[in-house]
């Protein structure tokens, strides 16, 4: 799954894919523009070259679009992220690298 950030909004793409997680932004979007979009849509925040994405935001973006078993897959993905050190200490945010669209 990935979080796609555009000039007009934010969406969760491929929510059923739990083996990859990243943020996609347009090549023309500056880091400052990305930071503003993440804040405006309550998605997360920049952390160096990465984004710390709110776990609650991912759930919100997936709501109504995924099946009942989605939460189990997402929870397993977060457990893997925690083992790799990609989850914040409080478990509220998961690290994602940024790719250009």
Image (cartoon, rainbow, N blue to C red):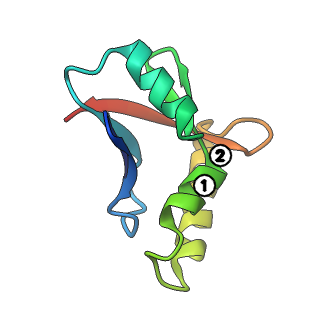
**Which residue has dot 1 on it?**
78
Residue 1 visible in the snapshot: no
**Image vertical order of residue 64 relative to residue 82, above or below:** below
Q: Report whether 35 appears left or right of 55.
A: left
- Taking the view exactly as shown, the residue that stands out farthest to the right is 90
Do callouts 2 and 1 mark residues in contact (Cβ within 8 Å)? yes
Q: Where is residue 26 in the image (x, y as percent from the top left)?
A: 23, 30
- Taking the view exactly as shown, the residue that stands out farthest to the front is 8
* Disc ID at residue 39: none
Q: What element carries label 2?
A: helix
Which is nearer the eye, 76 or 69? 69
Q: Report whether 18 appears left or right of 70.
A: left
Residue positioned 58% across, 61% down in the render = 59
Q: Is mark 1 on a helix, strand or loop?
A: helix
**Image vertical order of residue 64 relative to residue 43, above or below:** below
Residue positioned 38% across, 38% down in the render = 23
Q: Where is residue 90 in the image (x, y as percent from the top left)?
A: 80, 40
Q: Position of residue 44 (x, y in %)?
A: 58, 35
Circle 1 crowding by C-alpha within 10 Å: few under 14, some 14–19, many from 20? some
Q: Where is residue 34 in the image (x, y as percent from the top left)?
A: 41, 24
**Which residue has dot 2 on it?**
82
Q: From mark 2 to mark 1, how far is it between C-alphas?
A: 6 Å
């Amino acid at each position: 799954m990935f979080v796609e950030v555009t000039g007009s909004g934010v969406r969760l793409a491929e929510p059923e894919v739990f083996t990859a997680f990243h943020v996609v932004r347009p090549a023309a979007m500056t880091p400052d523009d990305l930071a503003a979009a993440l804040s405006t849509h309550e998605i997360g925040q920049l952390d160096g070259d990465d984004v710390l994405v709110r776990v609650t935001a991912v759930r919100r973006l997936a709501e109504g679009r995924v099946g009942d078993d989605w939460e189990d897959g997402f929870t397993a993905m977060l457990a893997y992220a925690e083992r790799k050190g990609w989850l914040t200490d409080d478990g509220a945010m998961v690290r994602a690298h940024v790719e250009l669209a």
